[in-house]
């Protein structure tokens, strides 16, 4: 019997931001979701993607299987499906592991600064900060080409409820492209916008407005599915962890402390979704995953190690409910 009793179970999938390594980790978690719970992510009724999660959401929405995502990460040839024969260079797709020097050192969006001053109590700190950061110069064109290869030109996903989250770089408002009330945009443009990390990549212009990474608003944006009539929601969040490692380097320790704040926000979003009657499962990287990741989510040489670690650890996490949940949130020493 379904969760609703008289109709099939309606499922939602939320794929969070987390850079190149976050994408690799999420693919391992998607494989675990399919293995442990028998859920094919492509069949979820609503799919929400933010930043790196938007790329995976676009691929799933076009019909790419989890098995194909794993093979694609490993550099193996894909012989069928939307990615058949498509060559993608992960080492060049998003550029180097550090952002390029900005052309100008001033604030990237004076309009966003003005908007945030008027709405400071209603905007996340990361959204406010993004206006003060210099404009990035990196290109996401290769990511756009990947999405275009699996999507009809200038059209949206074949999936009826695929939402890609970005932030308007002028007024600081969250925009879930693909949702009924959002502006219309080609899927490739929306995904590039969702991935446009401030000070790293150039903002993406859509219909005369500039957009940046949806992670500036929230690393998961899980609350968007509240009230969507879902029975089960799975949140795969690379920036959320309930068990932390104990790194020795200062930058990595600072990243872990920031991770705690992201985790707490995600839990508040999950509670909002639960208040509408959905059962919510949140999964994030554990200590082994974090050790594989290090402190830089764009550290390309770690990508395959992160994938292989997640393929093992995520199965263990989903099989044991004790590994998932706020009661086990640990502090960094």
Image (cartoon, helix red, strand yellow):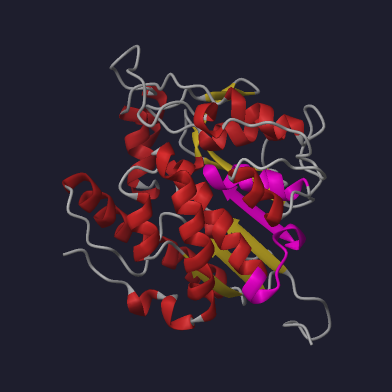
| Image spot of residue 77 (x, y percent) | 71, 40
Say whether residue 48 is magenta: yes
| Residue extent of the magenta highlight | 35-62
Q: For residue 147, say whether it is visible.
A: yes
| Image spot of residue 243 (x, y percent) | 33, 69
| Residue 58 falls in image quadrant | top right
| Residue 34 falls in image quadrant | bottom right
| Image spot of residue 262 (x, y percent) | 36, 56
Q: Residue at x 73, y 62 (%)?
A: 44
In the rendered view, tell whether residue 131 sits above or below residue 67.
above
Q: Residue at x 22, y 62 (%)?
A: 246
In the rendered view, tell whether residue 284 sits above or below residue 2.
above
Q: Nearer the viewer, residue 60 or 310?
A: 310
Q: Nearer the viewer, residue 3 or 109?
A: 3
Q: Residue at x 68, y 31 (%)?
A: 87
Q: For residue 179, say whether it is visible.
A: no
Say whether residue 86 is left or right of residue 245.
Answer: right
Say whether residue 318 is magenta: no
| Residue 328 falls in image quadrant | bottom left
Q: Residue at x 74, y 49 (%)?
A: 64
């Amino acid at each position: 019997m379904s969760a609703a009793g008289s109709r099939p179970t309606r499922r939602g999938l939320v794929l969070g931001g987390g850079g190149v390594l976050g994408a690799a980790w999420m693919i391992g978690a998607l494989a675990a979701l399919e293995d442990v719970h028998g859920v094919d992510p492509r069949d979820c009724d609503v799919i929400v993607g933010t930043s790196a999660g938007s790329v995976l959401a676009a691929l799933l929405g076009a019909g790419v299987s989890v098995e194909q995502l794993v093979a694609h990460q490993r550099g193996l040839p894909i012989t069928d499906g939307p990615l058949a024969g498509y060559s993608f260079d992960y080492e060049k797709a998003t550029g180097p592991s550090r952002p390029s020097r900005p052309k100008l050192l001033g604030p990237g969006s004076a309009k966003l600064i003005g908007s945030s001053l008027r709405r400071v109590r209603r905007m996340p700190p990361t959204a406010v900060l993004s206006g003060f950061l210099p404009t990035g110069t990196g290109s996401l064109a290769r990511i756009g080409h990947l999405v275009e290869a699996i999507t009809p030109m200038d059209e949206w996903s074949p999936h009826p409820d695929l939402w890609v989250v970005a932030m308007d770089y002028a007024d600081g408002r969250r925009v879930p492209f693909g949702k009924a009330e959002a502006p219309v945009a080609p899927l490739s443009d929306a995904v590039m916008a969702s991935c446009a990390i401030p000070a790293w990549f150039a903002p993406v212009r859509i219909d005369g407005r500039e957009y940046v990474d949806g992670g500036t608003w929230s690393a998961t944006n899980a609350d968007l599915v509240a009230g969507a009539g879902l029975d089960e929601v799975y949140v795969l969040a690379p920036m959320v962890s309930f068990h932390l490692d104990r790194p020795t380097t200062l930058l990595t320790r600072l990243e872990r402390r920031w991770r705690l704040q992201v985790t707490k926000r995600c839990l508040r979003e999950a509670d909002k979704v639960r208040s509408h009657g959905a059962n919510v499962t949140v999964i994030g990287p554990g200590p082994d995953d974090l050790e594989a990741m290090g402190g830089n989510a764009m550290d390309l040489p770690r990508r395959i190690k992160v994938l292989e670690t997640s393929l093992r650890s995520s199965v263990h996490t989903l099989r044991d409910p004790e590994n998932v949940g706020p009661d086990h949130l640990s502090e960094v020493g």
